[in-house]
């Protein structure tokens, strides 16, 4: 099979390439846990990592909300935070 244009089937080579690319997106500490593991293990680890990122975002959002609640809305610090959120 030559590429994806002529067929909807994906080759083993393409799967290996995608697995390598996906593995490269994970932080080093998570890649060490996987080693040269199966695509299935990599996908599970990737899902776990994405869930942990969602938890981190939720936590940071809660902390930011709490910080903003204690701050004068017209203060320079509040302006800085608002400008960071817009970018």
Image (cartoon, grey):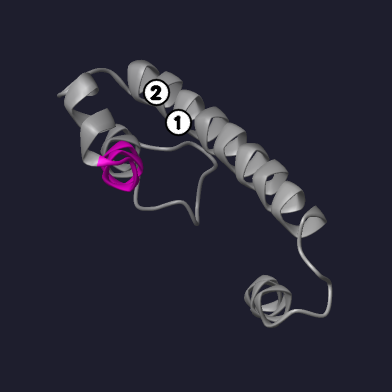
Q: Residue at x 76, y 51 (%)?
A: 65
**Magenta part of the chain:** 19-27
Give the total of numbered labels: 2
Residue 64 lies, in percent from the top left, at 68, 53
Give residue 15's mark. Answer: none
Q: Main secondary structure of the magenta part?
A: helix
Residue at x-position 51% and y-position 30%: 52
Residue 24: in magenta span:
yes
The quadrant of the image that shows the N terminus is: top left
Q: Position of residue 55 (x, y in %)?
A: 60, 32
Q: Which mark is residue 45?
A: 2
Question: Which one is closest to the eye, mark 1 or mark 2?
Answer: 1
Pointer 2 local density, CA inside 10 Å: few below 14, some 14–19, many at least 20: some
Residues 39 and 23: in front is 23
| Secondary structure state at the residue bearing disc 2 | helix
Contact check, label 1 and label 2, Cβ < 8 Å: yes
Residue 22 appears left or right of 76: left
Q: Quadrant of residue 69?
A: bottom right
Mark 1 and mark 2: span between their CA atoms? 6 Å
Q: Name the image quarter holding residue 68.
A: bottom right
The local secondary structure at tag 1 comes to helix
Is disc 1 surrounded by few (<14), some (14 to 19) or many (20+) residues within 10 Å? some
Is 21 placed left or right of 76 in the picture?
Answer: left
Q: Is residue 11 magenta?
A: no
Quadrant into which the C terminus falls: bottom right
Whole-percent x and y of residue 86? 71, 77
Residue ID at (82%, 80%)? 74
Which disc, if any, is residue 49?
1
Q: Is residue 61 above or below residue 43?
A: below
């Amino acid at each position: 099979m030559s590429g994806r244009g002529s067929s909807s089937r994906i080759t083993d080579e393409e799967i290996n390439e995608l697995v390598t690319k996906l593995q490269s997106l994970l932080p080093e500490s998570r890649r060490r846990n996987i080693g040269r593991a199966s695509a299935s293990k990599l996908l599970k680890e990737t899902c776990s990592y994405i869930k942990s990122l969602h938890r981190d975002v939720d936590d940071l959002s809660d902390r930011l909300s709490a910080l903003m609640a204690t701050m004068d809305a017209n203060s320079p610090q509040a302006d800085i935070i608002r400008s960071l959120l817009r970018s």
